[in-house]
Image: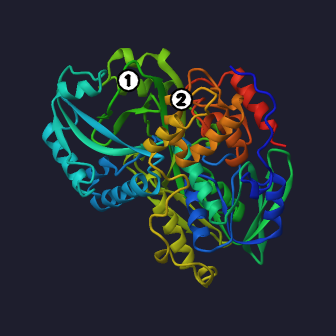
Amino acid sequence: MTTLQSVPALGTHPASGSLPSRAETRDQLSRATYDLLVIGGGILGISTAWHAAQSGLRVALVDAGDFAGATSSASSKLLHGGLRYLQTGAVKLVAENHFERRAVSREVAPHLANPLTFYLPVYKGGPHGAAKLGAGVFAYSALSAFGDGVGHVISPAKAQRDVPELRTDDLKAVAVYRDDQMNDARMALMTVRAAVDAGAVVLNHAAVTGLRFTRGRVTGAELKDSTDGTEFGVDARLVLNATGPWVDHLRKMEDPNAAPSIRLSKGAHLILKRTRPWRAALATPIDKYRITFALPWEDMLLLGTTDEEYEGDPADVSVTEADTAQILDEAAFSIKDQQLSRDLITYSFAGLRVLPGGPGDTSKAKRETVVTEGRGGMLSVAGGKWTTFRHIGRTVMNKLAALPGHPLAEDMEPMNRLPRKLPLPGIANPNAVAHRLLIDGPAPGPRMAPDTARHLATHYGSLAFDIARLANENPELAERVHPDAPEIWAQVAYARDHEWAETADDVLRRRTTLTIRGLATDDVREGVEKLLADRD
């Protein structure tokens, strides 16, 4: 690994392109009264802040940890219509999901999403027959207006050419459909950037220690910066609780007698090295309602997910031995043993789905968004799914506009007057970006490696050129962080100066893929921490 010399921040004033310091941001948050304070930096809170800032409101967004630091970076990495929802007759929901999926992957963030072919294997004695699944994938593609082709059925031999590790014993047929996938942490960060571009003020690693009240109404929050212990506060006309699994915790700050409003379901995943190339994903039916995924993702294989009720502390959620065994056992229905060796596992992670409160099996519960207003006027929003993150933001904004007394309506542009498909920063054709990165390398130095060029293009879009310039100006930053990963040190400097990275985990787990590749070694971590410390 390259030993980095000191690489100072690229500039500390916003005009130079770098972010303001945390002290400057705290001061800005403390001095103003915001129209809307969003507490929670998962994708739901981020999307709401983005839409609120677009509508002309003065918006602040804070999170106790990192942006997308919990559930929002622990998803199955899919933008999908929800094939299984057809089981419950939710045709309208699937059509709406498809609209949002295609809007994000084609017009809002084509640089951060990519199409993926899915194979549904039909085995002898399985929960569904070939005719039923064939009809299902046809209907699924029809609900997206056949924009991704027509769902159909192929032979096991054809499917195995694309998925060489597919089990063919007792395999009768394979149904085919298409959805999209993404790197959820990168999508969330680009949405934070879009919110800031629209005028929002954001700060991560700032935990709420209490709420501010004026005549019984929630009018702000007390916060503590976990990086240095500084305490400060934010005033706001309206506070939105978008804390995901912690939503009821914050509701009790508003009203100690608030009844629980949600329940939690844990979804665990495994990341494995691939033994051979995969050109399609597997979606294998486990029973009538559940599907287990095997997804080629970031040059690896993502397996999962589980779905079981979780009643512990959200901060303690983790992948247990039972989760690992279940995921591998279910994957073995359709994947050969050599691809499922525990030696191939590089990382595991678990997230918590936020579901409406009530009885019943969590796997059958609706993934709907719940918006409630508390006794002190604080709005709490929870639930939903990644695919519809823009729709959720619009839904919350429409709710704000319709509040009794209309506290914000006069100051905000109606959602129906705003662009429906405003793109995220860096929008570009990733193939064109990768090509440019390969041919525009520094004349005296080595060309950028193809895997690095592709990685930058599909994680930053046109913003990859800013990272390439950093690497060109400082040869040390052009070196790989780890020889077995595509990331270069310029990405760490960029994360520090432009993407709110404060800790090594912010960089290694969410701004890059080094942790999920099992490559966040002590040496790598030490190098990242050194570069982060050079921000001043």
Colouring used for the render: rainbow
Of circles 2 and 1, which is in front?
A: 2
Q: Which mark is residue 348?
A: 2
Residue 44: where, in percent of width, then height? 55, 57
Is the residue 401 above or below the residue 90 in the image? below
Mark 1, secondary structure of its residue: helix
Question: Do we see residue 260 in this rendering?
Answer: no
Q: Is residue 282 shown left or right of residue 461?
A: left
Is the residue 112 above or below the residue 20 in the image? above
What residue is shown at x 60% (from left), y 83% (from top)? 406
Q: Quadrant of the N terminus?
A: top right
Query: Mark 1: which amino acid?
Result: Asp
* Circles 2 and 1: CB atoms closer than 8 Å: no
Depth check: give the residue in front, 437 or 358. 437
Depth check: give the residue in front, 252 or 222. 222
Mark 2, secondary structure of its residue: strand
Residue 188: where, in percent of width, then height? 56, 50
Residue 522: where, in percent of width, then height? 71, 21
What residue is shown at x 69% (from left), y 48% (from top)? 498
Q: Quadrant of residue 101?
A: bottom left
Q: Quadrant of the C terminus?
A: top right
**Residue for badge 1:** 329
What residue is shown at x 58% (from left), y 48% (from top)? 463
Q: Is residue 85 shown left or right of residue 5?
A: left
Depth check: give the residue in front, 382 or 496. 496
What residue is shown at x 55% (from left), y 43% (from top)? 73
Q: Is residue 93 shown left or right of residue 531?
A: left
Mark pair 2, 1: CA separation? 15 Å
Query: Mark 2: which amino acid?
Result: Ser
Give the mark, 2 or 1, whose residue is nearer the N terminus.
1
Q: Is residue 97 shown left or right of residue 454?
A: left
Question: Do we see residue 78 in this rendering?
Answer: yes
